[in-house]
Amino acid sequence: MFSFFNSTSKIENHSHLPQEIITLTLGAEEIKGITERFPFSPKAIFGFLSPDLDFATTASKLHQAIGLETPLILSSTAGELCTLDGEKSLSSLYSRDDSKKIVLLLFSESILSDIFVASIPLFSEDIDQKGFPVAQKIQRITQEIQKIKVPFKIHHEDTLGYTLIDGLSRSESFFMEAIYQSGSFPCLLVGGSAGGKLDFQNTYIYDG
């Protein structure tokens, strides 16, 4: 969940918008010293990791390199789509197989005024059982959502909810229905599901 600056005066002080949001593409061997490539001090970083990388190890190295004070949200992918590395254009939208690439999206402090990160259980452990209690599952997720206390005012004009779902939980529709039932987040929601290899064994999310 993050809130954007909506003051015209604040926006006018930052005329170089391309330098307020930047995308970096790198390999795992380039993590050390990655902050030297940052054109600004990021308020938050979102990252997408190749399924061919060791997710836990890579996430730990990234957070150590970036600094523990910067919110870092990471997701495993089924393949990365990116055409930029800083101000340089890449030759292809699609990363090649087993590329072991990392894509980072940096937001500056002049774009985001506040950010809040929360995680909730999705209760998907018994989703394959016959007679799976859908209504009960949605109710339990709704209750978890209602426990979240965002420390800033949510407004539909300047607040955005970024959601990441365990790609193997098959709970995207349950989560969205619970969001609407809770009435807790009157703002736009964007995001998706964590991906992985096509063996459908693991997907990963990291919230720092």
Image (cartoon, helix red, strand yellow):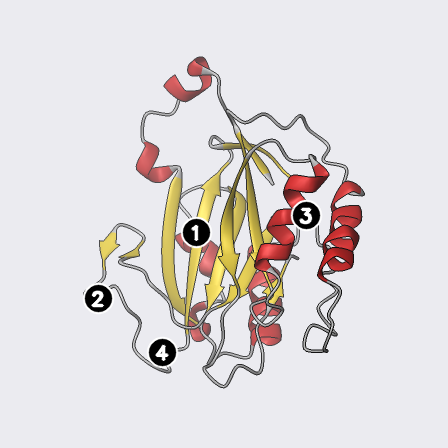
Residue type of the residue flagged with mark 4: Ser
Report the residue marked by disc 1. Answer: 105
> What element does badge 2 sit on?
loop
Q: Is residue 64 above or below residue 115?
A: below
Cβ–Cβ below 8 Å for labels 1 and 4? no
Residue type of the residue flagged with mark 3: Ala
Q: Position of residue 10 (x, y in %)?
A: 46, 19
> How far is the residue under mark 1 from the one under mark 2?
18 Å
Q: Label for residue 92?
A: 2
Residue drawn at x 41%, y 77% is 100
Report the residue marked by disc 4. Answer: 99
Q: Is residue 166 above or below residue 89?
A: below
> What element does badge 4 sit on?
loop
> How far is the residue under mark 4 from the one under mark 3?
37 Å
Q: Is residue 161 above or below residue 134?
A: above
- How packed is label 1: few (under 14 Cα within 10 Å), some, or many (20 or more)? some
